[in-house]
Image (spheres, rainbow, N blue to C red):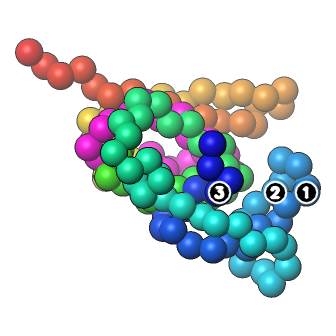
């Protein structure tokens, strides 16, 4: 366990904490400082086979920080795509740009059917 947030690069970030599921990275001058790390840097030579992200709107930045892992390792991905309206298309497009070898599926969760998760499953290699 790392006491860090996922980001596109290793960087100190401002973070609004203490507001439960609404906690988030912020550009404002208020909030706490946290260390943001990229998956590619933090995992070093590890070979993850599953990555799940529901990180309150920071998913694109975290995916950018996992480019090498997604491209080279093709882990199964479960990514929240409901925090920002354009995440619905920007996240699948970004993942496809990094690694086009995924089948993608969207599943709806939550009592109000508002939580969308994108599942990316590596395609089987053809014989």
User: Residue 33 occupies which quadrant of the picture?
Assistant: bottom right
Q: Residue at x 26, y 43 (%)?
A: 72
Q: In this image, 112 relative to 71: left or right? A: right
Picture layout, residue 72 above or below residue 68: above
The answer to whether residue 39 of the structure is visible from this angle is: yes
- SS class, disc 2: loop
Residue placed under numbered mark 3 in the picture: 4
Q: CA distance from mark 3 to mark 2?
A: 14 Å
Label 1 with label 2: CB-CB less than 8 Å: yes
Whole-percent x, y for residue 98 in the image: 31, 51
92 or 38, which is in the foreground?
A: 38
User: Would you say residue 86 sits in the magenta stretch?
Assistant: yes
Question: Dot 2 corresponds to which residue?
Answer: 23
Q: Nearer the viewer, residue 124 or 9?
A: 9
Give the class, few, some or many, for how many residues have Cα within 10 Å of label 1's Cα (few <14, many ≥20). few
Category of crowding for the residue at label 2, using alpha-carbon neighbours closer than 10 angstroms: few (below 14), some (14–19), many (at least 20): some
Image check: 91 left or right of 35? left
Quadrant of the image for the C terminus? top left
Q: CA distance from mark 1 to mark 2?
A: 7 Å
Q: Nearer the viewer, residue 85 or 5?
A: 5
Question: Quadrant where the N terminus lies?
Answer: top right
Q: Which residue is mark 1?
A: 18
First reached walking from the N terminus: tag 3 or tag 1: 3
Q: Earlier in the sequence, mark 1 or mark 2?
A: 1
Magenta segment, which residues? 71-93
The residue drawn where x is 62% and y is 49% is 2
Sequence-wise first label, 3 or 2: 3
């Amino acid at each position: 366990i790392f006491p860090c947030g996922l980001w596109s690069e290793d960087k100190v970030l401002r973070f609004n904490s203490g507001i439960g599921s609404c906690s988030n990275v912020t550009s404002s001058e208020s909030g706490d400082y946290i260390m943001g790390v990229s998956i590619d840097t933090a995992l070093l030579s590890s070979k993850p086979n599953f990555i799940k992200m529901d990180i309150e709107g920071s998913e694109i930045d975290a995916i950018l920080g996992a480019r090498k892992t997604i491209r080279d390792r093709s882990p199964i991905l479960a990514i929240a795509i409901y925090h920002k309206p354009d995440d619905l298309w920007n996240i699948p497009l970004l993942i496809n740009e990094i690694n086009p070898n995924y089948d993608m599926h969207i599943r709806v969760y939550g009592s109000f059917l508002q939580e969308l998760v994108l599942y990316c499953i590596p395609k089987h290699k053809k014989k």
